[in-house]
Image (cartoon, rainbow, N blue to C red):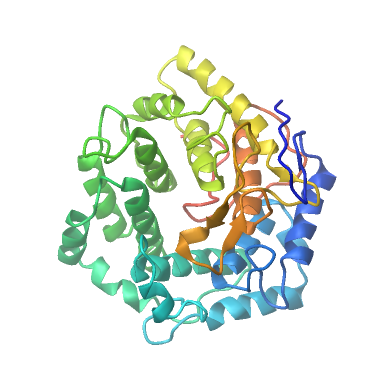
Amino acid sequence: MLFRFLKSDASPVAEVETGEDIAETARFIEQTLGTNDGYRFALGCPKTLLATCFGVCALEVLGALGSMSAGRREAVAGFIQSCQRKEDGLFRDPLHTDEVLFRLGKFSPQYIEWQESYFAIHALRALGARPEHSLEFVAPWLAADHLDRWLRSLDFENFWLTSNSLMFVMLFFISIEGEKSPAVHRLLDWLDRRQDPETGFWGTDQGASLFNGMAGAFHVYGYYQYLDRPIFHAAAAVRSTLAVQEPTGLFGDAGGGPCEDLDAVDILTKLEPGSAEDEKKVRAALELALAGLRACRLQGGGYAWSSPQPKVKRREMIYSGLDTLKVQSDAGDLWSAWFRPLAIALASERLGEKLAWPVKYRDLPLLGWHRPERS
């Protein structure tokens, strides 16, 4: 077990979580970051649509969403539904105006709009609610010729970023057309033709780094599994993922990150190794990752963006370039409060460890979704 510390108002702890620890995290989400009808990303942030969706999904994986009162559930769902536009079905946070989105550098307005819509669909389903308007904005992508042109325009050199849009649109397809959606299977057929057999990822034969390919591949593997499609070159993907693990057990850099670490843990948890030797390596990698993940838990129930490892410096993190979702890397935030316990649950289950809480996974792909048995 790793015990590493950064100077912070909420010191990290690195022990196997207990049921009371998980309950404390649920209280942190509800009492520290909750508002009357939603959630803030971190202390000092305003209520946003994305943070509210993260809060709902975090409470769900912690097994705590069921204890939310009917009145609170209705209020939170009502706020999410109020962000949907009637004319096209897009979900838009009122704080993220066109003026805000047009100033973003790395992320396009469509990327943020699709992301907000993707997480709104998930959170509403977790709350037992639905969007109030149809997803009309998806209609062009349901047409084969438009979908094909769009797919051919995507940047595979940064497949990590590109794959998010694929993840978003595939959920939209399934939401509209169901699991037999011609559009989602057309997209996955196209991905089959573009996969790099050497790494099991996408884009690594077009300039993407091995890490970039791994983080991107995670965003599509789950759709193959959800739709019971074979994942080609899975053994290569497992070996490639093992190759990008940091000595601290995390991924991306020594301190890892909530998204990066979940991406890798999910792959190692769900894809089948190609040999008994690789199986041993996967188990060892997950055991090491668990130590670094658990070190992210803070006194008071939160989880930090970065694991407090040697030479990891405190820095400001801005989610998707949005100033409304900003946090110091050693403070608690809702993205980490969802993804850190989720990664811990997946790794623990793969290793046969009993969890101290009644974890509940998402029932729609991709983020938070899991079947108990491996594919």
Q: Residue furthest bottom?
A: 87
Identify the residue at image location x=64%, y=58%: 334
Q: Residue 36: image x %, image y %?
A: 73, 78
Residue 75 placement: quadrant = bottom right
Q: How many marks?
A: 0
Identify the residue at image location x=66%, y=73%: 38
Residue 237 placement: quadrant = top left
Give 289 or 18, whichever is nearer the viewer.
Answer: 289
Q: Residue 147: image x %, image y %?
A: 21, 62
Give 273 or 256, whichever is nearer the viewer.
Answer: 256
Instruction: Say if residue 89 shows up in the picture.
Output: no
Asked if 154 appears above or below 213 in the picture, the reply is: below
Asked if 152 appears above or below 95 in the picture, the reply is: above
Q: Residue furthest right?
A: 20
Residue 96 left/right relative to 194? right
Give 282 or 311, whichever is nearer the viewer.
Answer: 311
Q: Residue 142: image x %, image y %?
A: 26, 67
Instruction: Say if residue 83 shows up in the picture.
Output: yes
Residue 249 left/right relative to 64? left
Residue 7 left/right relative to 229? right
Identify the residue at image location x=51%, y=64%: 119
Asked if 322 appears above or below 71 in the picture, the reply is: above
Quadrant (top left, top right, bottom left, bottom right) of the N terminus:
top right
Give 180 or 84, whichever is nearer the viewer.
Answer: 84
Q: Residue 240: image x %, image y %?
A: 38, 27
Identify the residue at image location x=62%, y=64%: 41
